């Protein structure tokens, strides 16, 4: 197995050596700095992850933690492809599903900074089909009324447009008839579509929402629409915009919408939890392995279509944590990052102590989401992956797994074990 464990731990010089050097006038006397992370507690995470593999609750996973931009913990367990006998490695490529949303939201903010988009613009300025939209009332009857106002870019960034993934019973057939909702894998899947994303989004505009714009937080196709807005506002296909403006400059060399055939062997197979909560290989097709290598390669889903590694995605998050720049490359202005990572919708989110910014869930109160600090932000993906950025602790936490559906609770527990290993003084 090629699993690699790398930990950046501050090494303390022995007290006797420090004292001797101090007497020689070479260094000042000072207390020896304690390591930020306990090595013993980091090793406990290894055992925690391995236990989920040994008990066959997951097929494989990668955990990665950065502190101050440096690797504090990295570990891979299990299988990238069990049938092929290919072990998981830190370099494995995962389907990140809704973790794509943060990258597409960053693309939108880049265009806002350039004056090509305004946050309060109506979406119809870029996709005219959204000039008149409709809402299915929750009355028990199929009553469809006109939306009270147009959907804006802000609505899409915060998931307050009233638009779901079309899987609710009252709208499911209408969406399915348009190859969306239940007909689109798990609802959000478009990698098998042989049409540009804007064509799909124009068809989406003819379908009823499930709530009025601005009425509440409704998770759905919002960021896929934003992907089309990026294309219309920039004049560049979404995959090229993200490659040229975000992943390329950040040296995210293993992040794509569709994987090059030469990297097929690094793509993790999708597992699923069976009725006994055992990990088994998921089927081929939209509800399993997907079309990310051999598909039509035409639908760039800004909401759920990107593939990446733990390392690549951590670089993107570190850029956000740094206020929009990494290694001397500026992607966003600090004020744009502040908008993205601060709550923008208040009580509309409906989760006590939590909020939602432009593409990120935010922690508004310590204790609202485990040990995460107030000011932390993050999200996850449908294949089970998750991430947290904690500005207070200077942490980036990435947990990658491809298991759908997943009944194991490992992703939710992983950040807790990381915080439990953080024993050094706060910054």
Image (spheres, rainbow, N blue to C red):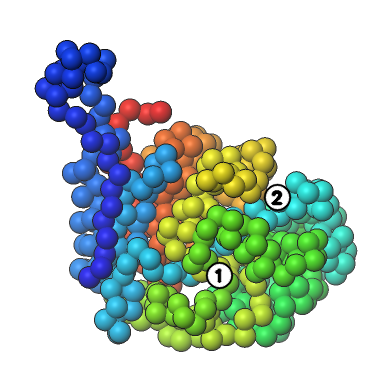
Q: Position of residue 150 (x, y in %)?
A: 84, 57
Marks 2 and 1, how far apart at CA: 20 Å
Front in this rendered view, residue 275 or 55: 55
Residue 41 can be seen, yes or no: yes
Query: Which image quarter: residue 183?
Result: bottom right
Q: Is residue 349 above or below residue 422?
A: below
Do labels 2 and 1 touch, CB within 8 Å?
Answer: no
Q: Which residue is mark 1?
A: 256
Q: Is 356 placed left or right of 424 in the picture? A: right
Residue 30 can be seen, yes or no: no
- Residue visible at 67% across and 37% down? 335
Q: Is 96 placed left or right of 215 in the picture? A: left
- Residue visible at 53% across and 53% down? 316
Count all numbered tags in the image, as a single digit. Answer: 2
Q: Position of residue 100 (x, y in %)?
A: 57, 62
Give the secondary structure at mark 2: helix
Is label 2 or label 1 in front?
1
Front in this rendered view, residue 268 or 4: 4
Mark 1 or mark 2, which is nearer the start of the sequence? Answer: 2
- Residue visible at 59% across and 56% down? 249
Give the secondary structure at mark 1: loop
Q: Position of residue 180 (x, y in %)?
A: 66, 78
Front in this rendered view, residue 127 or 31: 31
Q: Position of residue 353 (x, y in %)?
A: 52, 38
**Disc assigned to residue 109:** 2
User: Which quadrant of the figure contains the C terminus?
Assistant: top left
Q: Mark 2, residues whose alpha carbon is within 10 Å: few (<14), some, or many (≥20)?
A: many
């Amino acid at each position: 197995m090629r699993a690699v464990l790398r930990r950046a731990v501050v090494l303390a010089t022995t007290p006797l050596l420090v004292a001797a050097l101090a007497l020689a006038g070479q260094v000042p006397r000072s207390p020896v700095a304690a390591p930020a992370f306990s090595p013993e507690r980091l090793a406990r995470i290894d055992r925690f992850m391995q236990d989920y593999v040994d008990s066959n609750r997951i097929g494989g996973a990668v955990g990665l933690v950065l502190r101050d931009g440096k690797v504090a913990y990295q570990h891979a367990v299990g299988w990238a492809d069990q049938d092929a006998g290919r072990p998981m490695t830190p370099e494995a490529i995962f389907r990140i599903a809704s973790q794509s949303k943060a990258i597409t939201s960053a693309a939108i903010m880049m265009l806002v900074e350039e004056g090509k988009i305004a946050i309060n613009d109506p979406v119809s300025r870029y996709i005219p089909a959204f000039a008149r939209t409709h809402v299915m009332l929750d009355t028990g009857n199929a009553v469809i009324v006109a939306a009270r106002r147009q959907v804006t870019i802000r609505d899409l960034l915060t998931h307050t447009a009233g638009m779901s993934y079309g899987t609710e019973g009252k709208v499911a057939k209408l969406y399915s008839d348009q190859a969306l909702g239940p007909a689109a894998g798990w609802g959000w899947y478009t990698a098998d579509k042989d049409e540009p994303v804007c064509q799909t989004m124009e068809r989406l505009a003819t379908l009823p929402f499930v709530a009025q714009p601005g009425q509440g937080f409704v998770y759905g196709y919002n960021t896929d629409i934003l992907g089309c807005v990026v294309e219309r506002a920039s004049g560049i296909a979404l995959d090229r915009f993200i490659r040229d403006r975000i992943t390329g400059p950040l040296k995210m060399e293993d992040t794509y919408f569709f994987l090059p055939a030469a990297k097929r062997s690094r793509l993790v197979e999708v597992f699923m939890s069976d009725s006994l909560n055992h990990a088994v290989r998921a089927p081929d097709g939209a509800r399993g392995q997907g079309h990310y290598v051999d598909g039509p390669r035409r639908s760039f889903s800004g909401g759920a279509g990107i593939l990446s590694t733990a390392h690549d995605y951590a670089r993107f998050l570190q850029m956000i944590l740094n206020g929009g720049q990494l290694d001397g490359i500026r992607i966003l202005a600090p004020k744009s990052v502040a908008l993205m990572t601060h709550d923008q919708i208040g009580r509309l989110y409906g989760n006590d102590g939590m909020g939602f910014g432009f593409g990120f869930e935010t922690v508004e109160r310590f204790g609202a989401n485990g040990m995460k600090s107030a000011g932390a932000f993050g999200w996850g993906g449908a294949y089970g992956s998750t991430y947290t950025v904690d500005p207070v602790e200077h942490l980036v936490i990435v947990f990658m797994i491809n298991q759908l559906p997943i009944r194991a609770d490992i992703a939710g527990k992983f950040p807790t074990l990381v915080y439990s290993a953080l024993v050094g003084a706060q910054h």
